[in-house]
Image: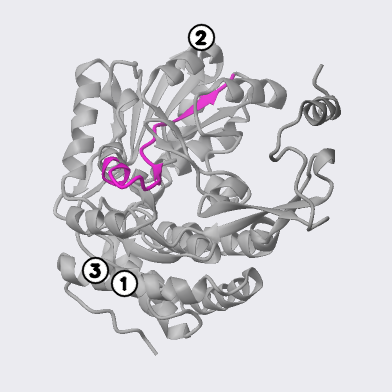
Amino acid sequence: MSLDIPGPHPETSPELAAQKAAAARAAFLAWSRADVAQRVAALRGVWSELARRRAEGAAVVAEEIGKPAAEIELLEFGPAALLVDHFTKSARRLLDERSVRVPWIFANKRAAVRRRPRGVIGVISPWNMPFLIPFGDAFCAMLAGNAVLLKPSEWATRTALWLEAAVAATGLLPEGLLSVVPGAAGAGERVADASDLVLFTGSASAGRAVAARAAGRLTPAILELGGKHPMIVLADAPLERASAAAVWGAFQNAGQVCVGVERAFVEGEVHDAFVEKVRARMSALRLSGPDAEIGRFVLPAALDRVQAQLDDARAKGARVIGGEVLDRPGRRMAPALVLDARPDMAVMSAETFGPVLAVMKVARAEDAVVLCNAGPFGLAASVWSRDVEKAERLAAALDAGMTGVNEPGTHYGFGSLPFGGAKESGLWRRHGDEGLLALTQAQSLLVHEWPLDVPDPWWFPYEARKTSLLARLLGLP
C-alpha cells in the first residue's frame, strides 16, 4: 500500500506550528519514560519498515530533486542503514546510567551520570540529501529519547512528508514524536523557537541566522554548514584511485554535496598524469537517459551561479573543459574541469556546489596545506599518497573537521566518527559518541550511602582540630 502524501505545502502557520510543538511535547513525555532498550527495539522496527518501503521513498526523492537511482540507493538509504546499525548497538553503552569513580575520601558515597533527553529537537534539513540527513538527525534524536520537529527544505518537502507518513504507519512510536513543519524561513524560525536544541544543515548565512535565533532563547544549535573539500595529491599518490575519487567526489549529486570535492592541489610531478586520468573518467560519465549519472541542479539560480564562477575562472586565465549547459529549463550542465586554477578565482575560494573540479599545480603538498587553511571553510579535506604516515601528518595540519587519507569523504556512513566542520563550516558535531551525547543532558547523581545518621565532618561547626586533620587527609601541605 502506498502512502498518501498531502500537498501542496504552504508555509506552516504560527497556530499549526504551535499545535505540532504541543503534540511533540506530549509525545516526548511518553517516549522519554521508555528505557534505552525499548527505544532501540522500536526504532529498529521503524527502520526495518522504512528499508522495506525504500523503493517508494526513492521514487519521491527522484521526482523531487532528480537524483540518479544509484545515488538514492547507495548514498541516501545505504548510509542510513549503517547509522542505524551503529547507534542501536552503541545506545546502551552511551545512554544507560554509568557509575563514575569517587575520591577515596568519599568512599561512603556513590556517583553516577545519567543521560536525560533534552525534550524537543528541531531538525532543519537541506534539499541535497532529502532522506539521509533528516532521517539520520531524527533517528539519533529519537534514540536519545527526544521528540522531533522537522523543517525540511521547501525544495524537498515531499520526501520529508513521506518519511513522516512511513514512520507513523509503523505504529511503533507515540503519535507526534516526529512531526514535519513545512515552509521556508518562517517555518524554520517557529521550529527553532519551539525546540530545546536545533540541528541545522545548510549554508553559512542561514546557519548564522538560525544560531542567532536560537541564542535568543539560550537554545544550543549544532550547525553543519558549507564546505570546499580540497584534495591534496602528492607525487607518489595512487593515481587511479585518486582520479576516480576526484571524479566521483566532485560530480556525485551534480556536485551538490557539502563534503564533495571541489578543488585538487596536485604536486607538479604528477599534475599532467592526474589531469589526463580525470579527463578520461569524465568523458565516460553518462549524462542523459535513464542511466544518467549526473543529475540536475535543484535550485533555479544554481546553474547561473556556477556558470558565473566558470566565467570568472576563464577571465583570469583558466582553461575550462566541459561545463556546457545541457538543458537550461531542466537546470542541467555537463561536469566541468578547471585547469590552471589560481587562489584568486572564485572557483577556488567560494563554495561552488555544482559539478566542477578545479585543479591547481603546487610545488609541494605543504604549500597546499597553507592555501587550504587560509580559506574560510573547514568541513572535509583529503590527502592522497602511498606514504600513509606522511599523508596523516599533512592531514593533521589541515584546519578541517573531517580529513581522509586516500579517502574522498565518506565519513557520514561511519556512525563512530564525529561529523562536522571548523571555521565557517559549522559548530559542534553530529555522530560519534559526542554527537549522540549532545542530544542529551548530563545529570550528575551523588548518593550518600553510609552512615545515614552522621553529618559529614566538613559541615558546621568548623573547628581548628577537625580542619587540620581534613587538610592532611586531603594532601594539603
- From this viewpoint, is residue 120 visible? yes
Asked if residue 50 lies in the magenta stretch, the reply is no
Farthest residue to the top: give it. Answer: 363
From the top left corner, tell me how far across and down residue 174 is, in percent.
Answer: 45, 80
Q: Nearer the viewer, residue 293 or 48?
A: 48
Q: Is residue 64 above or below residue 393?
A: below
Residues under numbered marks 3 and 1 in contact, where contact means CB atoms less than 8 Å apart: yes
Which label number is shown at residue 363? Answer: 2
Numbered label attached to residue 451: none
Q: Does residue 161 appear anywhere in the picture?
A: no
Type of the residue with mark 3 = Ala
- Amino acid type at circle 2 is Ala
Q: Is residue 90 left or right of residue 305?
A: right
Of the two numbered discs 2 and 1 in the rendering, the one whose residue sits closer to the viewer: 1
The label on residue 18 is 3
**Label 2 SS:** loop
**Quadrant of the image for the C terminus?**
top right
Residue that appears at 27% across and 37% down = 323
